[in-house]
Image: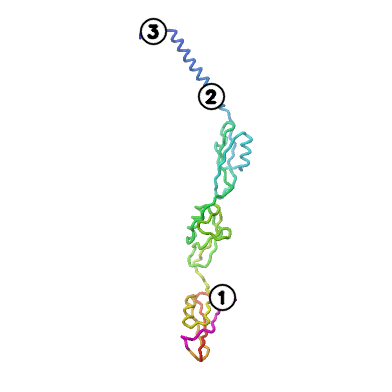
Amino acid sequence: MSSFFSYLKTKTFRKNLYWALGSVFAFLLIIFYSLRFYTHHGEGVPVPKLKGLPIERAIELLENQGFRYQIDSVYQLDKEPGIVIEQDPDPNTNVKLNRTLYLTIITRQAPDIRFPEISGKTYLEVAATLSNYGLKLGDTTYVNDVAKDVVLAFRFRGRDLQAGNSLPKGSVIDLILGDGKGASEVDIPNLLGLTLGEARMALLGSSLKMGTVNFQGSGRDTINSKIIKQYPAPTDSLSKVSIGSSVNVILSGGK
């Protein structure tokens, strides 16, 4: 053991130690510079700004500068199709030639969706539902109905829609809503040939009232006599009257 420690103090050991350390250092330098040369460390070109450009223009720039590219697409409502919205790496980043750049563009083809069930819902509920499905509100038309601001029907490009129909995302949907007033006019029923009792029931079902009752002849049989005239009567020029209107009748009085 003492001879080993004595050897450590000799010039021969120190000389060999220096050579070993120098060899290791030289080896590390060779590895470092070889890697820099092999990987072209510090060499590169800046990435052009592609965000906001049409995809055709972006591809032209990349190909002219020797870049490769990979394109992904998404659909966004109210965004111009074919425009680059994301890029990786970011603009002005130094990268090597032949590096692959990743682009995200707005797709030109809207995906299809299943139309939701909105019948019988209020306008505010339907507006929120359509927005969640990526659909737009179009024209709103009101019709006589007791349900106020309730969706009665819906259309796409003039055609009636049903829940579950397939249509492109971003489509414009027209709504038909109730005005809360209900029908203000009703059809005039034909009372000719009815008894007075039957006529009263027919008028009641049409939300109309019995007006004056007259007899033709001397008889006054209100049970069996038939209506032979009414006013107003349904004609080509008059088929509807306001709710609650009165209808006058003339019965065949007999003798």
What is the secondary structure assignment of the residue under circle 3? Answer: helix
Vertical comparison of 63 with 161: above or below: above
Lower sequence index among marks 3 and 1: 3
Q: For residue 94, which quarter of the picture?
A: top right
Q: Is residue 27 magenta?
A: no
Q: Identify the residue position indicated by label 1 in the image.
A: 239
Lower sequence index among marks 1 and 2: 2
Q: Identify the residue position indicated by label 2 in the image.
A: 35
Q: Amino acid at mark 2?
A: Leu
Q: Residues within 10 Å of mark 1 (few under 14, many from 20)?
A: some
Q: Residue at x 51, y 90 (%)?
A: 254
* Circles 2 and 3: CB atoms closer than 8 Å: no
| Residue 153 placement (x, y as % from top left) | 52, 62
Vertical comparison of 97 with 5: above or below: below
Magenta stretch mostly in which secondary structure?
loop
What is the secondary structure assignment of the residue under circle 1? Answer: loop
Magenta extent: 221-238
| Residue 71 placement (x, y as % from top left) | 57, 40
* In this picture, residue 172 sits left or right of residue 222: right
Q: CA distance from mark 2 to mark 3?
A: 42 Å
Q: Residues within 10 Å of mark 3 (few under 14, many from 20)?
A: few
Q: Identify the residue position indicated by label 3 in the image.
A: 6
Vertical comparison of 189 with 114: above or below: below
| Residue 150 placement (x, y as % from top left) | 49, 62
What is the secondary structure assignment of the residue under circle 2? Answer: helix
Lower sequence index among marks 2 and 3: 3
Q: Residue at x 53, y 66 (%)?
A: 143
Q: Amino acid at mark 3?
A: Ser
Vertical comparison of 246 with 38: above or below: below
Q: Amino acid at mark 1?
A: Ser
